Image (cartoon, rainbow, N blue to C red):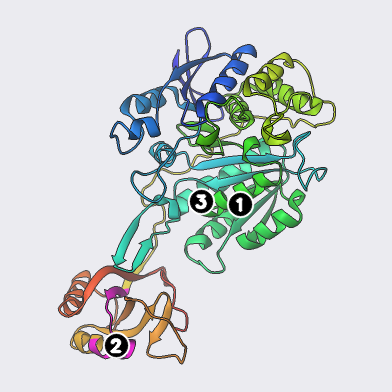
Amino acid sequence: MGLITTESGKKLYVTEDGRKLVTVIPGDGIGPECVEATLKILEAAKAPLVFEIREAGASVFKKGLASGVPPETIESIRKSRIVLKGPLETPVGYGEKSANVTLRKLFETYANVRPVRELPNVPTPYSGRGIDLVVVRENVEDLYAGIEHQQTPSVAQTLKLISNKGSEKIVRFAFELARAEGRKRVHCATKSNIMKLSEGTLKRTFEQVAQEYPDIEAQHIIVDNAAHQLVKRPEQFDVLVTSNMNGDILSDLASGLVGGLGFAPSANIGNEVAIFEAVHGSAPKYAGKNVINPTAVLLSAVMMLRYIEEFAVAELIENAVLYTLEEGKVLTGDIVGYDRGAKTTEYTEAIIANLGQKPRQTAVREYRPVRLPQVRSDIAYIKPQSRRIVGADVFVESDLRPEELGPALEELAAGSPFRLKMISNRGTQVYPPTGGLTDLVDHYRCRFLYKGEGEARQEDVVDLVQRVGSRFRWMQIEMLQEFDGEPGFTKAQGED
């Protein structure tokens, strides 16, 4: 049959005999053991799937491919549109980019979905509280765009990019997920009280989209309060949607409430491709010892089965996992201690033996297909009625004190259409002086405002930068713009 699109918008490759193609990446460290156990259970449950085994991660890095993802893996994913993968190893603090992030960004899997629920016989301080929530994390934007610059020898910059389009996709997905799983409340967690433009975009989009889902309660929450409330009263949450870095942190926190990363599945979902993987890493110290808990990868496969609308098989496997945990006869070392825990293979065989059983105490949620959000494909997603350049921030490297730098810049700008309004250092105004006591670094933001009527010209800004550059080393320019009369920039701390 080939590639098809379901009514809910998912793209799947279906073979002539009706099976669905899945690209399988075993991964690094404990990954191959977890994936092997999962594939055995899928086979025993008679899941109508066919697998293409491909590689990514450490083995690919060692071959000299900087992305960690070879062309044959990319081609398989382009064909199947569905990926089940084990954890991939990534060098920390140096070298290549994360192969995990590369896969997510190559295929625009904008929604990272991490369910968090209490499981039987997995003791935690929160046992009996009935935790059952989903963290929906934006997955391709924010600081994880990975755009960094060493702007001076002592100051590094990372760009935080949050778009209206990206925000609308993740917010709509969160509401659609809530509907598909019969959930009643969606919280949006942001730091928009501080980052009013970037995180504020997500908050404003959430408030707009929420009006289209009157059947679901919508609440905004500041992200640090979300962390506080997750620890204090996690059962109040149903769906929690947030930006990329916030979601990375909060979802790991949330998984700790229910037993740790060994029980934390996830999905990376886009409108073209979906990737299913455990939240945990490759844990190389446990690799090859037949002691690892494969539940996170297995439950990721259950999420995959629901995504491809194989609900009966998904329920069959989930019930067997819950029954096995409830029974408590075969539990892995991360639950009962590695000195007496079951082997990975023993745990796998126990789940296979329990296929067809149903848990007695643990409730199983009913699921419907998640309808993927369809948003406009415009590159220029927001088209203002008016816009104008009102100045420029010129970032300068200097070891001068502000009281020396300010007059020097004022002299350089004399005769240009701009005046120096202020200089900030790490976001705090230091010229003209405010009376504060600020520790300085060699990285100054110098704000120049247009003195004339109407709009500054780009060539005027270029001339200004040349004037500044005649004496100082500059490393970045930001146009100060107004859109529909509203400033597209924020003020420094202490700036009037």
Mark 1 and mark 2: span between their CA atoms? 42 Å
Measured from the top left, where is residue 282 in percent x and y? 51, 36
Q: Earlier in the sequence, mark 1 or mark 2?
A: 1
Question: Which quadrant holds residue 476?
Answer: bottom left
Pointer 3 and pointer 2: residues touching (CB < 8 Å)? no
* 171 to the left or right of 119: left
Measured from the top left, where is residue 233 in percent x and y? 76, 54
Give the residue at mark 1.
Answer: 250
Measured from the top left, where is residue 290 in percent x and y? 59, 24
User: Which amino acid, mark 1?
Assistant: Leu
Pointer 3 and pointer 1: residues touching (CB < 8 Å)? no
Label 1: which secondary element: helix
User: Which amino acid, mark 2?
Assistant: Gly
Q: Which residues are magenta?
A: 390-408
Mark 3 and mark 1: span between their CA atoms? 10 Å
Measured from the top left, where is residue 199 in percent x and y? 51, 61
For the point 51% across and 51% down, the residue is 244
Residue that extends furthest to the front in the rendered view of this protein: 339
User: Which amino acid, mark 3?
Assistant: Asn
Mark 3 and mark 2: span between their CA atoms? 38 Å
Q: Earlier in the sequence, mark 3 or mark 1?
A: 3
Count residues near mark 3 (Cα–Cα under 10 Å), then give few for <14, some for 14-19, many for 20+: many
Give the residue at mark 3.
Answer: 244
201 lies above or below 335: below
Based on the picture, tell me whether residue 463 belongs to the magenta stretch: no
